Image (spheres, rainbow, N blue to C red):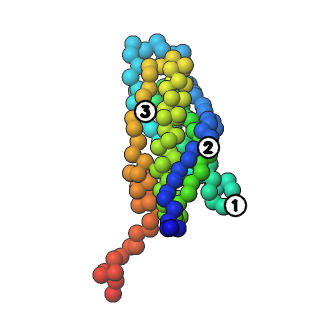
């Protein structure tokens, strides 16, 4: 029998950790003929091991959407969707992939629903968040964290 552990990710609890909605231009923004704001989305993923064995993690997906029109703020919505996950893996690399890719993938639909609800309750047209390639987000994060040397070995004298 093999001692290999197949990576496994089990959500134990999914919950809304924090949410906020601001519409600084209300009610004036509603007097405009059309509301068609430009929306900037930002994502952040954080995690914390919550047991001594490093098996249970709280993962928080923060989604921030800032809407502007003609240079003025229309609304700002921020959701911190969280979950407690049980993760088993052979090594830290597998665990890291599950925390950075698998967990946020599970959290996004909940964050999407909360943002859509807040924006709608704020009096604005439905806002739909497109699917996110969390593997791409993770790779980009790794690239930014990896320091590049000023000179390649071939260039050093």
Disc on the earlier residue, 2 or 1: 2
Nearest the viewer among 11 and 155 is 11
Please state which of the two labelled residues, at mark 2 or mark 3, is closer to the viewer: 2
Q: Give the percent coordinates (x, y) of residue 126.
A: 44, 22
Residue beneath the point at 43% across and 36% down: 40
Element marked by disc 1? loop
Question: Residue 52's mark?
Answer: 1
Disc on the earlier residue, 2 or 3: 2
Question: Residue 12's mark?
Answer: 2
Label 1 neighbourhood size at 10 Å, few (<14), some (14-19), many (20+)? Answer: few
Relative to 43, residue 19 above or below: above
Please state which of the two labelled residues, at mark 3 or mark 1, is closer to the viewer: 1
Label 2 neighbourhood size at 10 Å, few (<14), some (14-19), many (20+)? Answer: few
Residue 41 found in image quarter: top left
Answer yes or no: is residue 145 visible.
yes
The CA span between labels 3 and 1 is 36 Å
**Please, which residue is most extreme toward the left here?**
154
Disc on the earlier residue, 3 or 1: 1
Residue 157 found in image quarter: bottom left
Whether residue 128 sits left or right of residue 153 in the image: it is right
Please state which of the two labelled residues, at mark 2 or mark 1, is closer to the viewer: 2
**Residue identifier under label 3:** 129
């Amino acid at each position: 029998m093999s001692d290999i552990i197949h990576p496994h990710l089990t959500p134990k609890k999914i919950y809304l950790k924090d949410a906020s909605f601001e519409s600084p231009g209300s009610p004036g923004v509603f007097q405009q003929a059309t509301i068609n704001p430009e929306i900037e989305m930002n994502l952040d993923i954080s995690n914390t091991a919550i047991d001594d064995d490093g098996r249970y993690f709280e993962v928080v997906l923060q989604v921030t959407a800032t809407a502007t029109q003609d240079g003025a703020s229309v609304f700002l919505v921020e959701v911190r969707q969280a979950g407690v996950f049980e993760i088993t893996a052979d090594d830290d690399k597998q665990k890291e992939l599950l925390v950075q890719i698998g967990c946020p993938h599970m959290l996004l639909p909940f964050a999407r629903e909360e943002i859509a609800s807040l924006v709608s309750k704020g009096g604005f047209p439905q806002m739909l968040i497109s699917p996110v390639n969390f593997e791409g987000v993770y790779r980009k994060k790794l690239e930014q964290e990896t320091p590049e040397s000023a000179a390649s070995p071939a260039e050093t004298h």
